[in-house]
């Protein structure tokens, strides 16, 4: 198992290098000139060229990449073109709300979605299965903004149970933090709960048809033990895969939810940066999100190593 994990860890090194190169090229070959943006429309050609030289933008692209990669490996993602603030500081302030929203959404979706899918598999073809999969289909199909506005009206505006917008840090007021995150979590969680339910149903249903499950039943194992010790354990691999991928996707896909509920996270930060063409922020956010995605996949691989007896050998 240790050798398997070491191979997986070493395999991430070239992946990180490719991600860094892709992030750099996407931003620098986008057709916009950072020097022109900083100087403003009223600046002359000589002034823009002087600024390009000061920023090092007149050097060959490979040299610019090596300098940027070296600074990045030292933890320096540059400074914002508009605010002058280090990008690392801006990301460190904004990443907390995004991670809180992603983790809360994932917990909500897993706690509800996996049992839904498992129960639907056990009752396959009967009315509980059809009802649960119908609910899952609705949650999977509804646009996020429709779910958000519906929740805001029925749970915030009418009864006043939850705030409509805003984010309270947990260290300031944990109760208010939970109240403020409830609607955004349910909004995002409706989709992922439905996704996990459908994947769990398919995975568990496939396992229930396997020979080893029939053998366990023939040996007198109780239905609960057959489900938990045999079917669910073997079905855990595809379920964990989709959960891990979903967490990484959540970090890059919370833009709409953060905008609707006025949450100051990475989604809003990168949206503002794109509108202002603030390239260092765009580079930094994309790179951090990609690194988190790689890290999550490494964690999923570790879980594989614990679940799969062939790897533990």
Image (spheres, grey):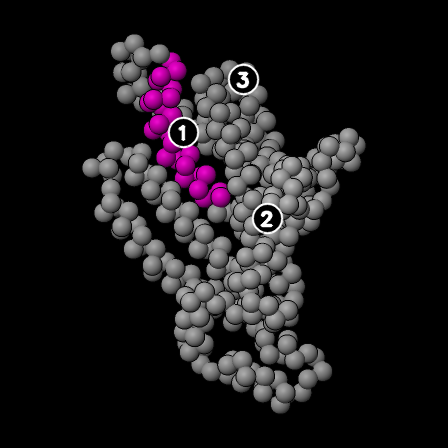
Q: Position of residue 293 (x, y in %)?
A: 44, 50
Q: Which residue matches tag 2? A: 97
Front-lying residue, 310 or 101: 101
Choose the circle earlier in sequence order: 2 or 3: 2
Dot 3, crowdedness within 10 Å: few (<14), some or many (≥20)?
some
Report helix, strand or loop for mark 2: helix
Quarter placement of the N terminus: top left
Q: Is residue 225 above or below residue 139?
A: above
The residue at the point 38 percent across, 63 percent down is: 17
Choose the circle earlier in sequence order: 2 or 1: 2
Q: CA distance from mark 2 to mark 1?
A: 33 Å
Q: Which residue matches tag 1? A: 203
Which mark identifies residue 279? none
Q: Which residue matches tag 3? A: 128
Q: The magenta stretch spans which residues? A: 223-247
Report helix, strand or loop for mark 1: helix
Q: CA distance from mark 1 to mark 3?
A: 17 Å
């Amino acid at each position: 198992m240790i050798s398997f994990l070491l191979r997986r860890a070493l395999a991430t090194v070239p992946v990180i290098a490719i991600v860094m190169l892709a992030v750099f090229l996407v931003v620098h070959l986008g057709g916009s000139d950072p020097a022109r943006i900083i100087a403003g429309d009223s600046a002359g050609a000589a002034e823009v060229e002087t600024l390009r030289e000061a920023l090092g933008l007149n050097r060959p692209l490979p040299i610019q990449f090596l300098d940027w990669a070296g600074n990045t490996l030292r933890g320096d993602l540059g400074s914002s073109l508009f605010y002058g603030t280090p990008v690392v500081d801006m990301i460190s302030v904004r990443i907390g709300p995004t991670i809180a929203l992603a983790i809360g959404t994932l917990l909500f979706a897993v706690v509800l979605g996996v049992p839904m899918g498992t129960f639907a598999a056990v009752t396959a073809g009967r009315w509980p299965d059809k009802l649960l999969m119908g609910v899952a289909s609705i949650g999977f199909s509804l646009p996020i903004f429709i779910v958000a506005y519906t929740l805001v009206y029925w749970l915030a505006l009418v009864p006043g149970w939850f705030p409509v917008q805003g984010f309270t840090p947990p260290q300031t007021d944990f109760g208010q933090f939970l109240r403020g995150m409830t609607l955004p979590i349910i909004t995002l969680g409706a989709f992922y709960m439905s996704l996990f339910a459908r994947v769990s149903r398919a995975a568990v249903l496939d396992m229930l048809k396997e020979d080893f499950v029939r053998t366990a039943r023939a040996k007198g194992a109780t239905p609960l033990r057959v489900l938990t010790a045999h079917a669910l354990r073997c079905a855990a691999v595809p379920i964990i895969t989709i959960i891990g991928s979903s967490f990484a996707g959540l970090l890059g896909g919370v833009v709409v939810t953060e905008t609707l509920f006025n949450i100051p996270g990475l989604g809003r930060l990168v949206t503002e940066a794109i509108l202002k063409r603030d390239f260092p922020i765009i580079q930094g956010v994309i790179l951090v999100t990609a690194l988190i995605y790689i890290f999550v996949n490494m964690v999923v691989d570790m879980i594989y190593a614990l679940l799969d007896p062939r790897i533990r050998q």
